Amino acid sequence: MSQIIIRKIARKQGLTRYFTGKPCKWGHVVDRYVSDGQCVECAWEWGRKWAAANPEKARERNRKRYVANSEKAKERVRKDRMANPEKWMEWARNGRTADPGRPHHTTGNNQ
């Protein structure tokens, strides 16, 4: 969003974000959330730090989010595959060997 709009108007219009054109406490000039006025960039940074400090909780939260929105996630991947076939072909060729430390998925009793 690049159009300047105040929070009160954004809330009345049913928007989730608004833009003031002014920097936040940390100097980011980006959208803010209508719900709490927090800068989107600061919220993103906080989320990454929280996830790094709470990996199990973050993993469970992401799993629940995926289960609740699995069709949207699958559609996103399908669209990305259509838009970036070279990337996906490269992944198919060596994706499983690109990271030797990455655990391989097993099925059944092949653990």
Image: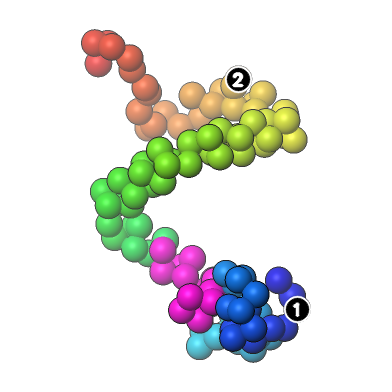
Of 70 and 46, the residue lying toward us: 70
In the displayed structure image, the side of residue 57 where residue 7 appears, left or right: right
At 59% across and 86% down in the image, what residue appears? 8
Q: Is residue 109 above or below residue 87?
A: above
Say what secondary structure mark 1 lies in.
loop
Q: Which mark is residue 31?
A: none
**Which residues fall within the magenta stretch?**
32-47
Q: Is residue 55 above or below residue 44?
A: above
Picture quadrant of residue 23? bottom right
Residue projecting furthest to the front: 12
Q: Is residue 90 above or below residue 48?
A: above
Can residue 65 be seen here? The reply is yes
At 46% across and 32% down in the image, what residue appears? 99
Q: Position of residue 58 (x, y in %)?
A: 33, 52
Q: Position of residue 18 (x, y in %)?
A: 63, 77
Say what secondary structure mark 2 lies in.
helix
Circles 1 and 2, Cβ within 8 Å, touching? The answer is: no
Disc 1 residue type? Gln
**Which residue is disc 1 drawn over?**
3
Q: Which mark is residue 93?
A: 2
Can residue 87 be seen here? The reply is no
Q: Is residue 39 above or below residue 45?
A: below
Of 47 and 15, the residue lying toward us: 15
Q: Position of residue 36 (x, y in %)?
A: 46, 79
At 49% across and 66% down in the image, what residue appears? 44
Instruction: Between label 1 and label 2, give the one nearer the viewer.
Output: 1
